Amino acid sequence: MAASLYLSPRMADALLWLGRYQQRLETLGKETLVQFDIVIDRDLHAGRKLFEKLGVGLSYTCATDFLKNACYGEHDASLYWISAQARENAITARDLLSDRLFGSVNGVHAALKHHQADNNLDAYELEQLLDEIEYFWGRLSTRLVKSRAAQFILLGQRIEMIDLKLRLYGEVDTLLEDAKQLNLLGSQLSDDWQVFQPLNYSLAQNMQTLAGVSAQVIRYANH
Amino acid sequence: MLENNDSYKRFFALFQQQNHTRLSGFDDFMQRQGVTFNLYKNNQFVEQTFPFDAIPRIIPADEFARLSKGLAQRVAALNAFLNDIYGEQKIIKDGIIPPDFVFGSKAYLPSFHGCAVTKQIRTHISGLDLVKDSATNEWLILEDNLRVPSGASYPLSIRRAYRQLFPQLFEQMSIIPSDHYGDRLSAMYDHVNPGGISVVLSPGRFNSAFYEHSYLARISGARLVTNEDLFVENKMLYLRSFNGKRVRVGVVYRRLDDDFLDPLSFRNDSMIGVPNLMSVYRAGNVALLNAVGNGIADDKGIYYFVPKMIGYYLGEAPLMSNAPTFLPWFESDRRYVIENLHRLVIKDVAEAGGYGVLFGDKLSQQQLSDLAAHINAEPRRFIAQERIEFYDIPTFINGKVEPRKSDLRMYIVHGEDINVWAGGLTRFAREEGNYLVNSSQGGGFKDTWVLGA
């Protein structure tokens, strides 16, 4: 019997969150660079406004200080913290990941850690790291894409994309393609998937629905 | 004395032609791939890389052929011993092994007497520790590990990096590929499987060997699980599936000791075991790798009797020898040990990982006297061995090649046949003159290259 077809809820959860944290890292990394550029000489408060949307109060004095706080500040939206969460989930699910995929997650975290120790992360370095973060999705190899493991990672990615679009931009009407992908993955993983239809609902209702998505596909049954 | 046979000469001749700056690639590889072992220092969880040395241990083809036969023979005898001890106990009745050595050992589990295992195999994965005696040029067995031998993942992982960094060495040295180990494990799972999927049961992410658990699960096609993923119902073991369903588990490559396997049968404070797992095992509905109660066969006191087991069960002469060993439990041995304590190596049978090993020549008169008193009071607790002057092998230390004591753990997979893996974990002491090579004692590791004919 092929063991690769079977995943425990714990493992499925780790894969889904790996996808979520990787996507969060990518999106917030890019947003941090955009705001960094604005903070330099256009709007000192741009970075603070971004993190307010994530429920984080960020204080800084200049663009460099903003970058440091966005990457290493003691809050749950710091790039370092997010990369550590991605790594933890990758370690948990490691037997299901290729060396390249795992190495990509681990390598980004190690680089962030290294820059923290040397206190030398600048925007240019972060740009390089973003390339590495983006490669993660490309490294979901053909073999893995066909697997359950990849479905959960991609489901996590899609949930996070929708979540961030709602939180950061409040845009319900741009979610159609994301919802289509989410429904496709959800229906592959659950026999009684409830179709996600964002256009019919408010932002708050969508956030609430999204929060229940993982429970639709990962069931901790009491045997 | 430095082992410096023709194979090493060939290696160095080829290695000199290589770009040595590429050596840093090993560290990069291990960092990126998280090839670590975990430990707690001052109550802090630390992930540590295992120090690696790029100069491999090299075993010529004829030497491996002899090792292979000798180790397979030894594992066959140990497996027969375990089946006998948990069955008819003929070896005791026939007076080959004194009953005290079995029934007095904490590792013997009388409650499993009569408990059959699938295909009569108990020694699915063995790790036998060897050293090569510089006086005789022969390999000697130092220890049999038949419970949860660890370490195979490190040479397996590094081999891939080695082939990428220095492919010319592999093109020109006829090194037997080692990556079939996962396939061997997988075939063995299939052989002993009474029905269901195969899993590697890990204590979890904070266990010292978690990297190894995930690696072995991946290469053998098993699912990596922790106890919360499994449950027992009607003497069957199941994996909880993410969709609320369940799937039967037939093979558990368990990476936790007997004591922690099932809180209802062993330690009731175990947070990492599976309740009622033993009911499944006793019913023959799951194969546990290795079998429960194997500790009796790798007890340091039982080690003394393995050559006798080979004669008793297989009717053969042992192809490999133990290190010369004395059992203070025997009156004549005890006298010899006490008289020669100052030059012997004394081991506490209850300890492992290089702990409880005392070198007589390093002890003061008072310490020797105290030790003699301990041995007289509890002779079953100790064994004594002649100090083996085992070979040093060349090792990079701060950029220079220096001799370092090294042992070798070889892995034997017992399924349809008994297969000695053409690779192994070579451990080396990082300080000159140190005989303790264990990772817990600060030792590092090397790859082990077995040459083709």
Image: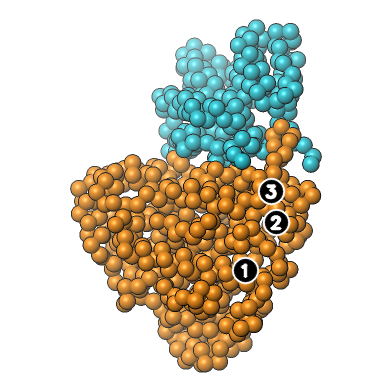
For marks 2 and 1, give the CA distance: 15 Å
**Residue marked by disc 1:** B83
Q: Name the kind of residue labelled 3 in the image.
A: Asn
The residue carrying mark 3 is B227
Label 1 CA crowd tier, 10 Å (few <14, some 14–19, many 20+): many
Q: Earlier in the sequence, mark 3 or mark 2?
A: 3
The chain drawn orange is chain what? B
Subunit that carries the residue with mark 1: B
x, y (%) of residue B369?
52, 88
Answer with mark 3 or mark 1, whichever residue precedes in sequence.
1
The colour applied to the residues of chain A in this rendering is: cyan
**Mark carried by residue B284:** 2
Q: Quadrant of the N terminus of chain B?
A: bottom left
Tell me what residue is drawn at x 26 percent, y 60 percent.
Answer: B8
Disc number at residue B299? none
| In front of the other: A78 or B48 | B48
**Residue A8, x across and y down, in percent:** 67, 38
The answer as to whether the residues below labels 3 and 2 share one chain is yes
Q: Under tag 2, what secondary structure?
A: loop
